[in-house]
Image: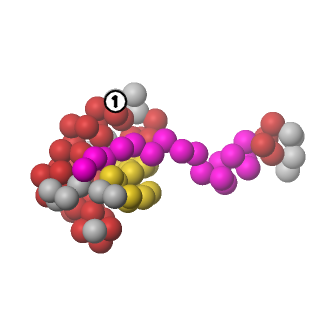
């Protein structure tokens, strides 16, 4: 399932998101629910949830009937958290 989702994101979803200087990647699949993280300009866009629903979820569910849902992964990477801690602690 992951290979097919990755192919659909690469071939059908990312070209649309790249028009707005963004992209998407899979961060997990569990029991038919796909977690997607937005990258680039899409990661901080106020319309990210709408883009998820109107574009990403629609395309994935049309292409793959076995997909039950598509959810937005808004987690922050550990590297970013570590960098923020160093800045707050004034470390180099």
Count of numbered circles in the view? 1
Q: Is residue 79 magenta?
A: yes
Q: From the top left corner, tell me how far across and down residue 23 is, in percent.
A: 35, 51
* 80 in relation to 8, above or below: above
> The residue tagged with tag 1: helix, strand or loop?
loop
Name the foreground residue: 90 vs 68: 68
Is 81 positioned to the left or the right of 64 in the image?
right
Magenta residues (range): 68-84
- Where's residue 10, x and y in %? 27, 62
Q: Residue at x 80, y 45 (%)?
A: 86
Q: Residue at x 19, y 58 (%)?
A: 66
Coloring basis for residues:
secondary structure
Image coordinates for residue 35, horizontal then vertical, percent = 39, 51
Image quadrant in which the N terminus is located: bottom left
Which residue was labeled with disc 1? Answer: 47
Figure quadrant of residue 90: top right
Residue 54 in sight in this render:
yes
State the image quarter where residue 32 is shown: bottom left
Q: Position of residue 91 (x, y in %)?
A: 87, 46
Residue 15 in view, yes or no: no
Above-or-below relation of 84 to 5: above
Is residue 78 or residue 31 the one in the foreground?
31
Seen from this angle, which residue lies furthest front? 31
Q: Nearer the viewer, residue 13 or 30?
A: 30
x 40%, y 33%: residue? 45
Looking at the image, the residue that sits furthest to the top is 46
The residue sitting at 66% across, 54% down in the picture is 79
Within 10 Å of the Cα at label 1, are there few (<14), some (14-19), or many (20+) other Cα atoms?
Answer: few
In reply to whether residue 40 is colored magenta, the answer given is: no
């Amino acid at each position: 399932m992951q290979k097919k989702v990755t192919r659909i994101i690469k071939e059908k979803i990312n070209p649309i998101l790249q028009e707005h200087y963004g992209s998407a990647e899979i961060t997990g699949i569990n029991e038919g629910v796909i977690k997607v993280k937005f990258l680039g300009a899409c990661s901080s866009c106020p319309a990210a949830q709408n883009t998820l629903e109107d574009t990403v979820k629609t395309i994935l569910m049309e292409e793959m009937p076995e997909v039950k849902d598509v959810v937005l992964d808004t987690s922050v990477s550990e590297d970013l958290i570590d960098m923020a801690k160093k800045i707050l602690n004034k470390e180099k």
